[in-house]
Amino acid sequence: MFPFTIKVNVILLIVFLLQTTAYGQDRTITSKLNPGCEDCGLNSTLIYVKAEGLKDTIHQIWDFTQGIPTMILAVGGVNSSIDINWNGSKPNNFSMVGKPRYSCATAIDKIYEYNDLEDTGRFDVNHPYRMQALKNVSWELKESVLTSKKVMVRLRGTLHDKERRGTIDMKLDYVNFTDYARTLPHLIHNANTTLVDISLVNLTTSRHFNSSRFAVHFVLVSKDPNNLSMRSITRKSLDDEHTPGVFEIIEIKSPSLWISGAGGFLQFRPVAYVESKRNVGSSTLAHVSNFTRGTLPQSSTLETFYEGYDEKNLLVQDLVVSFGEPGDGFYKQHNYTAWSYTLGYGWPPSESLSLLAVLIISLGLCVPAVLVAVGGVLVVARRRSRPPTSPSHPSHLTDEDSLERRCNSFRTV
């Protein structure tokens, strides 16, 4: 029993280490803010991240210069690079040294305010809604970390609309190792993914809507044949260690990913939060719409980057993510909604048991085994400590009984 338990613990530890290293490919990070831009001021933010691996290089563009939050991911050879030409404070041209192997991108070009008359939380085009384009949002860089191990930026976007006020906070985080986000829902991210967090804060709701909620509109782009479609997969999980009460993971996969394993993806938990202090009590649901055919936003960074690409091999689709669940009081209850997701390349990382969980399981297996082993040792020791007894003389006779029997024998004689 004891040797078997030791084997089980060793196997659990090996599995944990393998899962940890499987998604932990180290990359050498180089990052720059507005590289090559001479006219960029405080309101211009474009981050270029170059992550060199052993077999490829992942290039990322995080752009906020034209209002629309845009993330572009391009994969090239080990010695590849991207040069950016500027027109004032806006990127005018992207040129890649070395032929790109693959590219994908996301942009949040608009938000929807919708009147959720049936209190389902889901965005429905058949119900009243208003669209707010983000091309005129001004973004202010609040915080940035650009090192060889980590790239992080935190920005605040301000709406400039007569009928709508409020802010949109965004945080982008990239590290060259496998880690979990510090805040709920504690999404896993690694050297092939970037963690994104978006918060809709104090947005003005329409006086004509009594059940206002908000949704974000994504433009998804991938270097795939445009007659294919991306796929949304909901994966069940028995483990809610990192996100208590949430047992599902949603993955949006590009055609190249589910065909060859080398493509782009979005990964997230179907949960959002209605308070800045995130916990189970402040959570609500995140809903994903069906895909629809889309186009690149006009005069956008996406249009600039993919200029010259073969339209037949460029897949553009729209996706809406909405937030809310029945009985949560709608957006006006807290005037706050936050949601997190990751954008990455290659196979999406899978969550594994933490070292603490492995140790707890190991202890759970060890303690009963130790108790059984100690009990067995005590039983054996007790048996060996008893004096030997003759088969013809019962062992239950006391010393007085033996003495009396001997005296009676002498009297008889």
Image (cartoon, rainbow, N blue to C red):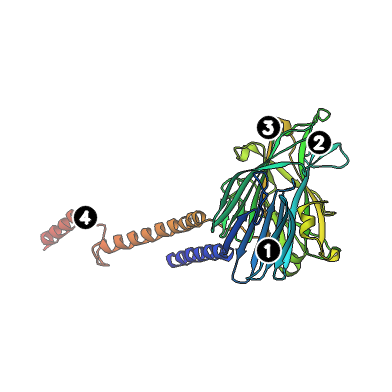
- Residue type highlighted by circle 1: Ile
In the rendered view of the protein, which quadrant contains the N terminus?
bottom left
Label 1 sits on a secondary structure element that is: strand
Label located before the other in sequence (2 or 1): 1
Amino acid found under the numbered disc labelled 4: Thr
Residue 121 placed where, x, y %?
Answer: 77, 40
* Residue found at x 76% / y 54%: 301
Label 2, label 1: how far apart the Cα atoms are: 44 Å
Pick whichever of labels 3 and 4 is earlier in the sequence: 3
**Earlier sequence position, callout 2 versus callout 4:** 2
Dot 3 crowding, Cα within 10 Å, few <14, some 14–19, many 20+: some
Q: Please tell me whether mark 2 sits on a helix, a strand or a loop.
A: loop
Q: Label 2: few (<14), some or many (≥20) within 10 Å?
A: many
What number is the disc on residue 116? 2
- The residue labelled by disc 4 is 398
Which residue lies under the disc numbered 3?
Answer: 334
Asked whether residue 87 is in view, the answer is yes
Front in this rendered view, residue 301 or 335: 301
Q: Which residue is mark 1?
A: 82
**Marking on residue 348:** none
| Residue 120: percent from left, percent from top | 79, 39
Is 331 left or right of 186, judged from the image as shown?
right
Observer able to see residue 329? no
Q: Position of residue 190 (x, y in %)?
A: 60, 59
Whole-angstrom CA distance, mark 1 to mark 4, is 97 Å
Which residue corresponds to the image point at 61% horizontal and 55% vertical from the top-left? Answer: 188
The CA distance from mark 1 to mark 3 is: 43 Å
Residue 369 figure quarter: bottom left
Q: Position of residue 59 (x, y in %)?
A: 66, 62
Which of the two discs, 3 and 4, sits closer to the camera?
3
